[in-house]
Image (tube, grey):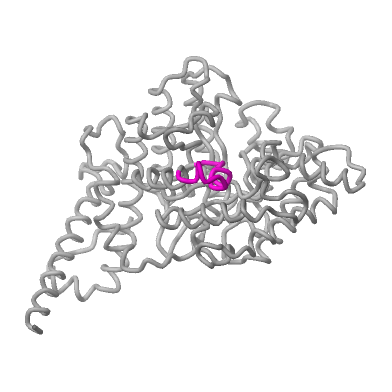
């Protein structure tokens, strides 16, 4: 029996060694180019890949399994300079938005759609989902009035988090909304007025002490929530990638940006004081403001510099770990799809990646981007071109160790939810070309993330073992 066990062990070691060698050889062809002296790192287009190329689902039980499945326990996502890391290894994000998960989970008739969505997202390698951890004073509200919660809706959010973990998808949870949908800052102002406060603008949300206390109480309630499915406190759960202070905060009543800046400074520190383990981001769209007059020309229009936000200043705040940017050329530049949209997308991304590297020293996530089917001239080919451009731009940053930390497409829907579509919905089963692009990008990022992890695991910790199996094996140059 002992001899049999030893033989099996040797066979297993040999198979793993051959597997690692073949993976490193494959990745080296991706990373190191064709040997003609040109820099070909990750520089290939979707069009050049045959239709039957291997996708994320093809390799989901491959080298990812060797690296990740050894220990099912998750670690928190952290930042190291301008990169996201998990267990000290790079973690580049390919993700998506689906804002309504909590509301769907609150109804037994639609709860299954949450599971269906995560299953489909995981099948194309998506690793992060951004969704709402708020619904203030509306239909099926989480927070019915200040500090008064619907326990059944909270259990629905518990369910969303537990289901995400099952499919190895991490969550960015947004804590409030700038817009009136799902309550937003307008609902906080209504609550304040009902309590007798003299409030003149929805922007008083950012400055009034009572409204600030309402928001802080909500943050404390969410962070300290114990999940009824997993028995894990939210602030201890690595399923949560990050907390977002607010979805797309704007303060048009103060174009100087001082009012919003004060709010960000106070709330970022408050969240970190309650939960120092998780990452925090603001939720900004990325508009440049008064602190960088040399960058405002990059804004999509002149109005963008008058909404009280300031990309670089807002992110140079204690407690903020990474930057967020949104991309909506159809809303900001022109409604009709055109090459101008592609040009804006590229310059917008390049500028923010550069600023995140030079001035912020942190990663940036392009947390919303997409193309609406309601745009004049829309076709799926153009949407695919936008996705391809976003992904290619990020890979260009990745290969240089830049600040392009990832992207979250707006937005992914399961089948049978068309009535919720705002025009941007992507249903993978109905969009094979788009699904193919997403899957291919996941494959590339998974290769990069995994080989970095494997390089450390096998090239460093197991160096002697590798020398024994492959005496002539030499590690590739560091990426």
Confirm whether the magenta stretch covers residue 429. Answer: no
Q: Quadrant of residue 62?
A: bottom left
Q: Residue at x 65, y 36 (%)?
A: 294
Confirm whether the magenta stretch covers residue 100. Answer: yes
The location of residue 110, given as percent across then percent down, is: 50, 41
The residue lying toward the viewer, choosing from 292 and 155, is: 155
Q: Residue at x 88, y 38 (%)?
A: 200
Residue 33's place in the image compared with 7, above or below, is above
Number of marks in the rendered image: 0
Residue 145's place in the image compared with 305, above or below, is below
The location of residue 333, given as percent across then percent down, is: 59, 23
Range covered by the magenta-colored residues: 97-112
Quarter of the picture holding the C terminus:
bottom left
The location of residue 8, given as percent across then percent down, is: 11, 73
Q: Residue at x 30, y 57 (%)?
A: 64
In this view, the residue farthest toward the bottom is 2
Q: Is residue 8 left or right of residue 280?
A: left
Q: Is residue 270 left or right of residue 460?
A: right
Quarter of the picture holding the N terminus:
bottom left
The location of residue 176, given as percent across then percent down, is: 68, 47
Q: Residue at x 49, y 64 (%)?
A: 76
The residue lying toward the viewer, choosing from 133 and 350, is: 133
Residue 259's place in the image compared with 233, above or below, is above
In this view, the residue farthest toward the front is 109
Task: Inspect this view and state whether residue 101 appears.
Answer: yes
Q: Is residue 89 left or right of residue 258?
A: left
Q: Is residue 357 left or right of residue 456?
A: right
Task: Inspect this view and state whether residue 80 appears.
Answer: no
């Amino acid at each position: 029996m002992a001899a049999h066990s030893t033989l099996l062990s040797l066979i297993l070691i040999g198979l793993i060694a051959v597997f690692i060698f073949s993976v490193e050889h494959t990745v080296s062809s991706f990373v190191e180019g064709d040997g003609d002296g040109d820099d070909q790192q990750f520089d290939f287009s979707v069009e050049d890949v045959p239709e039957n190329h291997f996708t994320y689902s093809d390799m989901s039980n491959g080298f990812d399994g060797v690296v990740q499945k050894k220990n099912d326990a998750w670690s928190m996502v952290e930042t190291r300079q301008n990169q996201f890391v998990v267990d000290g290894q790079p973690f580049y994000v390919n993700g998506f938005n689906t804002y309504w998960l909590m509301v769907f989970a609150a109804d037994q008739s639609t709860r299954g759609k949450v599971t269906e969505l995560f299953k489909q997202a995981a099948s194309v390698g998506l690793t992060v989902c951004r969704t709402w951890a708020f619904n203030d004073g509306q239909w099926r509200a989480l927070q019915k009035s200040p500090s008064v919660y619907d326990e059944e809706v909270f259990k629905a959010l518990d369910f969303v988090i537990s289901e995400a973990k099952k499919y190895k998808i991490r969550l960015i949870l947004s804590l409030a909304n700038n817009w009136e949908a799902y309550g937003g800052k307008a609902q906080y102002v209504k609550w304040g007025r009902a309590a007798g406060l003299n409030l003149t603008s929805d922007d008083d949300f950012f400055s009034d002490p009572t409204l600030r206390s309402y928001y802080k109480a909500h943050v404390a309630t969410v962070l300290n929530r114990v999940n009824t499915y997993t028995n894990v406190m939210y602030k201890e759960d690595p399923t949560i990638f990050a907390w977002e202070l607010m979805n797309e905060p704007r303060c048009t009543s103060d174009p100087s940006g001082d009012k919003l800046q004060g709010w960000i400074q106070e709330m970022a520190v408050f969240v970190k004081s309650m939960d120092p383990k998780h990452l925090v981001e603001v939720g900004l769209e990325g508009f440049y403001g008064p602190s960088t007059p040399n960058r405002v020309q990059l804004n999509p229009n002149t109005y963008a510099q008058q909404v009280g936000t300031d990309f670089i200043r807002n992110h140079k705040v204690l407690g903020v770990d990474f930057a967020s940017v949104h991309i909506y050329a159809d809303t900001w530049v022109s409604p009709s799809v055109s090459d101008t949209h592609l040009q804006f997308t590229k310059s917008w991304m390049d500028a923010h990646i550069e600023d995140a590297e030079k001035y912020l020293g942190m990663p940036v996530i392009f947390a919303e981007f997409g193309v609406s089917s309601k745009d004049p001239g829309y076709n799926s080919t153009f949407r695919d071109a936008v996705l391809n451009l976003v992904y290619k731009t990020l890979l260009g940053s990745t290969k240089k160790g830049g600040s392009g930390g990832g992207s979250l497409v707006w937005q992914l829907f399961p089948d049978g939810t068309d009535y919720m579509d705002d025009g941007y919905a992507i249903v993978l089963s109905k969009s094979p070309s788009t699904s193919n692009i997403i899957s291919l990008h996941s494959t590339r990022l998974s290769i990069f993330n995994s080989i970095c992890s494997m390089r450390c695991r096998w090239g460093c910790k197991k160096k002697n073992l590798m020398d024994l199996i492959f005496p002539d094996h030499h590690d590739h140059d560091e990426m």
